Image (cartoon, rainbow, N blue to C red):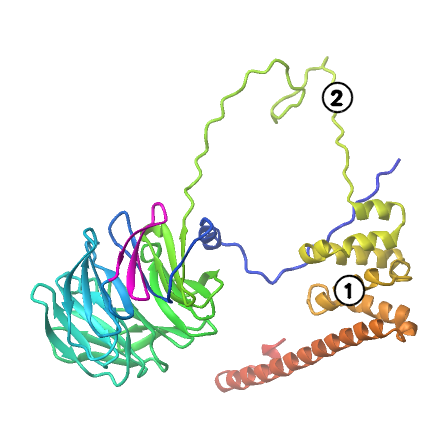
């Protein structure tokens, strides 16, 4: 007897991004641990030294978390008002944070003690940094000034007052103890040399600057503001690259993968990860709330994300799996399976082929019995519609080929008809299924057009008609935009080449 041929599920092309090594790498992180704080997470910073504790600045305190077991170690709470921008020194022994009252507070991490208080700013200090030599501090304040402080003497050495608006971003050079940059809401980023009393380079970002980041080697730096991220070369005095991947304001920047990747957090609830060579997005992390701060531990052992609703997300990288050696078990009976490709039976051996039982799905069993309506009912269930719409469309294509699609769709009422119309409404705008579902929609209208006196049925058909009209308008608009773009490209190309536009788009 001839076996029933299984339904061929068509592999419709998907618009999803291709699987890359970066996708696999960044997906290899454990489920995040979430900690609820009392205020928005202003800053997340990892200690450069092992065990790489993470400092989380929120409300009127700086929390220190142990990344090895995801527990809170201590809390620096000597602030009278809102705390901002707590960061570690490169040896991990000291931590400095700004505050709403303009003071800088220096803490000893191991003893949890406050060592110094630097007073002088007249407005909130949102960002502060240690210089690469570890004995000076830089403060970036809303009083439109940048301060250079000496830690041992607790004195202010220099003041830079070139900005015209709040200064909310700052970064220091790791290769030179004299270079640092500041970003302001006046749209400018300035580079300074502490051996002079003024900036040595100024560039216009175009929007209020929320974050800056300086490469560890060389003078290149990155500014983020609005929805754009820009890479600058101060030596050549020019813009190297501009990236716009977010659709809301970028709030934070950090390096990852030991400087090979850049992470940007945004109010659009996404974290974009870029390749530092091409500045292309290699992966995207999604969160439930707008993001204010991002941080990554050395070797990407963990990722810390701070959000506006006070949630701090700590996510660890899973350890690499080691293949354990499987010891053979002593078995009393010998298997008749032959797994070796080199095995050849002897001439006097009797070879019995194993026939595996073929398992058919429910809709295939109905197709085998020519029960087309029941087969369509199976693939119209909510679970199949949600997870495997290509199965539903493939079955419809098979029923069209058999000429039984009308019989399968006829005589439906209530929930059975509602599921069919709901599927068409949901996926008729999908380019993968559009041609098939348009034919099905015409058949549906032909079968149930005489029954439009039913108010519920009329309402559903009106909604379906509105969806089709919206799709038609969208396609018309896309064609108009495509025509305009082709005209612009043709005009631009004709100014430099003798090739005709017809040859360009041939």
Q: From what the image shows, is residue 199 above or below residue 385?
A: below
Query: Which is more toward the observer, 443 or 377?
Result: 377
Local SS, label 1 = helix
Rendered residue at 37%/81% (across/down): 207
Residue 498 in view here: no
Above/below status of 164 relative to 108: below
Q: Is residue 120 left or right of residue 388?
A: left
Marks 2 and 1 in Cβ contact (< 8 Å) = no
Depth check: 14 or 119 in front? 119
Q: Position of residue 442 (x, y in %)?
A: 84, 70
Mark 1 = which residue?
436
Secondary structure of the residue carrying numbered label 2: loop
> From which residue to which does the magenta span run?
55-77
**In the image, residue 472 above or below residue 361:** below
Q: Position of residue 364 (x, y in %)?
A: 81, 46
The residue beneath circle 2 is 352
């Amino acid at each position: 007897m001839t076996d029933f041929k299984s339904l061929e599920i068509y592999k419709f092309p998907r618009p999803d991004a291709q699987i890359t090594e970066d996708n696999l790498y960044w997906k290899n992180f454990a489920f995040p641990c979430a900690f609820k704080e009392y205020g928005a997470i202003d800053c997340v910073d990892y200690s450069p030294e092992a065990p790489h504790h993470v400092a989380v600045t929120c409300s009127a305190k700086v929390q220190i978390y142990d990344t090895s077991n995801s527990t809170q170690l201590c809390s620096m709470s000597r602030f009278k008002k809102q705390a901002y921008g707590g960061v570690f020194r490169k040896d991990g022994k000291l931590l400095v944070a700004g505050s709403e009252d303009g003071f800088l507070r220096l803490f000893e991490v191991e003893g949890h003690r406050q060592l110094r208080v630097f007073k002088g700013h007249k407005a909130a200090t949102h960002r502060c940094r240690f210089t690469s030599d570890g004995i000076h501090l830089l403060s970036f304040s809303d009083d439109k000034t940048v301060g250079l402080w000496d830690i041992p003497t607790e004195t202010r050495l220099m003041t830079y007052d070139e900005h015209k608006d709040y200064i909310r971003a700052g970064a220091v050079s790791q290769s030179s103890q004299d270079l640092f940059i500041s970003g302001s809401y006046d749209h400018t980023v300035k580079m300074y040399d502490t051996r002079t009393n003024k900036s040595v380079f100024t560039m216009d970002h175009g929007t209020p600057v929320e974050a800056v980041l300086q490469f560890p080697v060389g003078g290149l730096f990155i500014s983020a503001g609005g929805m754009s991220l820009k890479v600058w070369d101060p030596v050549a005095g020019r813009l190297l690259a501009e990236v716009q991947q977010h659709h809301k304001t970028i709030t934070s920047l950090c390096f990852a993968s030991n400087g090979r990747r850049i992470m940007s957090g945004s109010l659009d609830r996404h974290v974009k990860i870029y390749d530092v060579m091409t500045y292309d997005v290699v992966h995207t992390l999604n969160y439930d709330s707008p993001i204010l701060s991002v941080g990554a531990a050395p070797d990407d052992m963990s990722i810390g994300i701070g959000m506006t609703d006070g949630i701090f997300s700590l996510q660890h990288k899973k350890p690499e799996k080691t293949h354990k050696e499987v010891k053979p078990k002593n078995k009393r009976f010998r298997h008749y399976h032959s797994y070796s490709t080199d095995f050849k039976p002897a001439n006097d051996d009797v070879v019995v082929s194993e026939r595996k039982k073929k398992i058919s799905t429910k809709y295939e069993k109905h197709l085998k019995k020519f029960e087309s309506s029941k087969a369509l009912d199976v693939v119209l269930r909510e679970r199949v519609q949600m997870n495997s719409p290509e199965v539903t469309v493939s079955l419809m294509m098979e029923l069209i080929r058999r000429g039984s699609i009308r019989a399968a769709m006829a005589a439906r009422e209530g929930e059975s008809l509602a599921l069919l119309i709901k599927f068409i409404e949901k996926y008729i705008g999908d380019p993968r299924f559009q041609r098939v579902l348009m034919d099905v929609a015409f058949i549906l209208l032909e079968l149930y057009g005489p029954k439009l006196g039913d108010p519920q049925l009329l309402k559903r058909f009106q909604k379906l008609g509105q969806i089709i009209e919206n799709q038609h308008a969208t396609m018309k608009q896309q064609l108009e935009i495509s025509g305009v773009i082709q005209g612009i490209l043709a005009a631009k190309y004709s100014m430099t080449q003798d090739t005709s536009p017809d040859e360009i788009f041939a």
